[in-house]
Image (cartoon, rainbow, N blue to C red):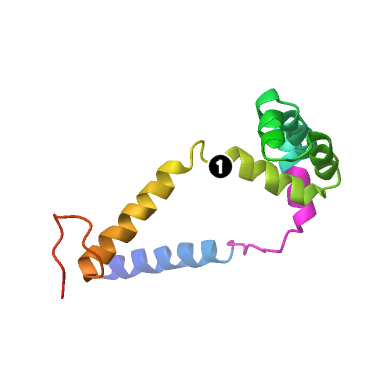
Amino acid sequence: MKSLKRLFSVLLVVCLSHFTLLQTAQAALIPTDQVARSVASASGQSPHDRLGELMSREDIAAQMEKLGVDPEQARARVDALTDEEAVLLADQLENAPAGGIIGAILLVFFVLLVTDILGFTKVFPFTRSVK
């Protein structure tokens, strides 16, 4: 029993000595412009350059003209963006879905399905109304 007490006391001393060595972490807010600079430096290309490359593509210029937007005015507006806005816009363009139509079709389907289940419409024959 005495050796067990001695073992526990040694274990307790070792644990408490390691407890004093723990360090706390400090957190702080990071300004947006610092994040924008780090993202731009990590990609190796500034967000304005990435957007400029997108604007110079033939298919994008044709689509802008089709929508009634002058490509030169669009380039001027991209050049006038701040770094934070350019990073946000470039990220949104890179992460945007290619079609977008599939999401719209699924949204309409689910809305009609829910309204059928609630009994407001009768579009799908495989649903039963809760009314």
**Crowd around label 1: few <14 · some 14–19 · many ≥20 (10 Å):** few
**In the image, residue 81 lies at what x, y percent?**
82, 48
Front residue (pair 124, 16): 124
Quarter of the rendering occupied by the C terminus: bottom left
Seen in the picture, residue 11 relative to 104 is either above or below; the reply is: below
**In the image, residue 113 lies at what x, y percent?**
26, 59
Q: What residue range appears in magenta?
A: 21-38
Quadrant of the rendered image containing residue 122: bottom left
Asked if the stretch drawn in magenta spans residue 35, the answer is yes
Q: Residue at x 77, y 59 (%)?
A: 31
**In the image, residue 70 lies at what x, y percent?**
79, 37
**In the image, residue 39 lies at what x, y percent?**
71, 42
Front residue (pair 92, 101): 101
Seen in the picture, residue 125 relative to 27 is either above or below; the reply is: above
Characterize the magenta stretch by its predominant secondary structure: loop
Asked if the stretch drawn in magenta spans residue 80, the answer is no
Q: Which residue is mark 1?
A: 96
The type of residue carrying mark 1 is: Ala
Side of 77 where 10 appears, left or right: left
Q: Residue at x 75, y 56 (%)?
A: 32
Quadrant of the rendered image containing residue 37: top right
Quarter of the rendering occupied by the N terminus: bottom left
